[in-house]
Image: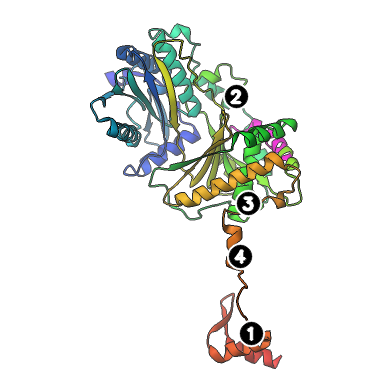
Amino acid sequence: MNARSQSIEDILPVTALQEGMIFHHVYDDSAPDSYVAQVAFDLDGALDEAGLHAAAGELLRRHPNLRSSFRQRRTGQWVRILRRRVRVPWHERDLSGVPATERERALDAEVSADRLRRFDLGDAPLIRFTLLRLGEERFRFVLTAHHAVVDGWSMAVLLRELVVLYRNGADPSVLPAARSHRDHLAWLRTRDRAAAERAWGETLAELPGPCLLAPGADPATVLPERLDFALDEETGAALVDAARARGITLNTVLQCAWALVLGGLTGRDDVVFGMTVSGRPAELDGADHMVGLFINTVPLRIRLHPDEALSDLLVRVQQEQARLLDHHHLGLTEIQRAAGVDELFDAGMVFENFPRHTDDPDSATLRVRDVQSRNATHYPLTLISGTGERIGGRLVYRPDLFTTERVQQIADTLVGVLRTMAHALELPVGGVDVSLPGERWRVLEEWNDTAVDVRWASLVGLFEEQVVRVSGAVAVEFEGGVVSYGELDARANRV
């Protein structure tokens, strides 16, 4: 047994979601890796750099999943290998000497370059730490990880624990014990797979094809961009009050608003998009403190009935989703197989409700502020929202498929729908304006501009004039058959 094999702590099967991300990573190693999560935040005060390094090392020791790498067996099966010990991938850069006018640009370049640097899935750990000095007692700390070993909730856990460990000399006794990832795998084995397949099959029955914004789009070859939006405080408060009065969650409100917008974009009244769920079961004690990839993407189908009141739509959708809660563990590939389809959607939605770090400026000499995160998404368009001081979020999009102007129009439409929900939930679904800004004017005014002089003529007379002008031109084309104006005129005269 060599030293390499002795360093192995455990070998585990990969989940369906991990396998999908692994395939994407090895499919084209020359393209940017969209499955990378990153959190960056500022540190103000006297920083003990060695202490922060030790706290990062304790995170790797405390959470076995962070010591994972992935290997493919001769059979083609992928497995996850947990190492007993790994190095702490630590990088430091001093930007304090960069002129103040250029420092922000240099900082952004460093953070972006760190995110773009691909991970080798066979080399643990799939996480790295970067400390950037900006000046006297000013730092930016960056934590970047491959999404195969963390999700958004995990990044929030790591940030919170990193700060606690730093302030307590990397002593893990101040934190709750980290639960084994095998416990989650064991919980998955207790789920009723057949019942889940039946539930999803019934939910997606008679679906009129996939709901696509960019049909035929190639796999992503560029990193996604984002556009932020927010409701004004008064409208946001009114929306929360209107939902609370009917027992509706903010998540349901945003799901229905997003469905209305997607319905307008696709021309469908039977909308499906991908919904990211946490995958952390309440009955698994300690799941909130686990670090790993637990999220799942499941289809959310919303039928839009034009004569149904918005308030009734919200209630119905929340009830429909409640019946599927016990079946969120089934992977998307398995759900599609149960529904008998190969593809369901290319738009997504994420509602972030994981614990956010808040720092008391009086609690220590080192203060944490301006926390920013970027999570993985590979769909052409994804809505990311959540709880916060203001109702809003961001649209993450592929710039090779959507222009910034187009995404801004979509964001404006979404804000308009949310504003309608805040003040007029009694309005029928068909009465909600989901046209993009300027689209209604273009159709009703520009394309239907009748402010021109038109000579009097009968329809028959105008057609006969056309026959004389372009007798051989195509007038009708149907199921492979073509009829010219001259032939159509002759047939009409025979009739």
Give the label, 4 or 3, closer to the camera: 4
Say which label, 2 or 4, has the lower sequence index: 2
Of mark 4 and mark 1, the one earlier in the sequence is 4
> What percent of the width, then of the height, locates residue 436?
57, 53
Q: Around disc 2, counting alpha carbons within 10 Å, would you say few (fewer than 14), some (14 to 19), or many (20 or more)?
A: some
Which label sits on residue 35? Answer: none
Residue 384 appears in the figure: yes
SS category of the residue bearing label 2: loop
Is 318 in the magenta? yes
Q: CA distance from mark 2 to mark 3?
A: 36 Å
Q: Nearer the viewer, mark 1 or mark 2?
A: 1
- Asked whether the residues under the numbered discs 4 and 3 touch, taking CB atoms below 8 Å apart as contact, a structural biologist would say no
Q: Position of residue 197 (x, y in %)?
A: 63, 38
Q: Is residue 373 left or right of residue 184?
A: left
Q: Which residues are magenta?
A: 316-331
Camera-nearest residue between 114 and 328: 114
Whether residue 340 is visible: no
Residue at the image position 67 percent from the left and 85 percent from the top: 456
Q: Quadrant of the N terminus?
A: top left
The mark found on residue 434 in the picture is 3
